[in-house]
Image: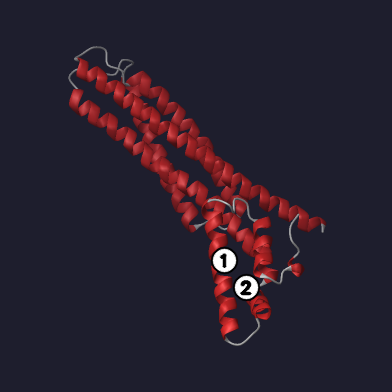
């Protein structure tokens, strides 16, 4: 149940009202947001006290300046920011992870090209590289959209759904293609060991990307659900 803005006259009350409307205020960006607001309100209250107002009146004035009637609007903007920032970080991780995977395999073939070949033809290797490159481009586009065109929580959530689905599909596809295309038939032990090491590195990076993508989707979904709940509550109030 959210705190009524009519009841907000103190800094703790205002922050409680914001926490009730914003998910994930205990960790990460949400906690930083609440901390920044509290510091700003306390500075404003201190300025009023220095001007000669009693502590209780100074605190009330600081809250009034912040605008208790703007809590819902500010909370909506914060939820959009939290959802966007979660997907943005995941897009950055995917945008970095794929070049690392592709570069590691490129270096491997540059060193062991005389003893290592695609065991299932060149199509799997081409597909592996193509999917990786497209994933980097899509991640870059996601970063650009979320940095410059995010406005509403529902729009950000649609971007998060699309990004999550495409990222998980591309990670699964490239992970499969890596084992189809990057397997040495024969050769010196060094080449075989290096191939296994690069495969393991790719698996670790892929695992990290999957975890980050799923976590970002969970955070974006929480922000979207909170926004839907508030809108539904307002319609029935």
The vertical placement of 23 against 203, above or below, is below
Disc on res. 37: 1
Q: Secondary structure at mark 2?
A: helix
Residue, x 20% and y 19% (percent of image)?
Answer: 190
Q: Which residue is mark 2?
A: 66
Q: Is residue 108 left or right of residue 213?
A: left
Q: Are marks 2 and 1 in contact (CB under 8 Å)?
A: yes
The image's colour scheme reads secondary structure
Q: Is residue 63 left or right of residue 84?
A: right
Residue, x 37% and y 37% (percent of image)?
Answer: 98
Give the label, 2 or 1, closer to the camera. 1
**Mark 2 neighbour class, 10 Å CA radius: few under 14, some 14 to 19, many 20 or more:** some
* Residue farthest toward the bottom in the current orientation of the protein: 52
* Residue farthest toward the right in the current orientation of the protein: 237
> The N terminus is located in which quarter?
bottom right
**Mark 1 neighbour class, 10 Å CA radius: few under 14, some 14 to 19, many 20 or more:** some
């Amino acid at each position: 149940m959210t705190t009524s803005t009519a009841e907000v006259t103190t800094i703790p009350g205002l922050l409680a009202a914001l926490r009730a409307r914003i998910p994930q205020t205990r960790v990460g960006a949400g906690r930083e947001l609440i901390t920044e607001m509290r510091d700003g309100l306390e500075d404003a209250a201190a300025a009023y006290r220095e001007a000669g107002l009693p502590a209780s009146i100074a605190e009330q004035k600081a809250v009034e300046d912040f605008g208790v009637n703007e809590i819902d609007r500010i909370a909506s903007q914060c939820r959009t920011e939290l959802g966007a920032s979660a997907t943005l970080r995941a897009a950055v991780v995917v945008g970095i992870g794929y070049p690392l995977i592709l570069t590691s395999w490129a270096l491997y073939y540059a060193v062991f090209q005389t003893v290592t070949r695609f065991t299932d033809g060149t199509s799997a290797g081409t597909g592996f590289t193509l999917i990786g490159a497209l994933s980097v481009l899509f991640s870059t586009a996601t970063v650009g959209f979320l940095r410059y065109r995010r406005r509403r929580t529902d729009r950000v959530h649609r971007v998060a759904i699309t990004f999550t689905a495409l990222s998980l599909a591309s990670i699964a596809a490239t992970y499969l293609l890596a084992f189809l295309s990057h397997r040495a038939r024969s050769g010196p032990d060094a080449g075989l060991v290096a191939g296994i090491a690069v495969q393991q590195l790719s698996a670790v990076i892929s695992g990290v990307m999957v975890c980050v993508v799923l976590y970002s989707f969970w955070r974006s979904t929480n922000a979207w659900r909170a926004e839907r709940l508030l809108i539904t509550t307002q319609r029935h109030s």
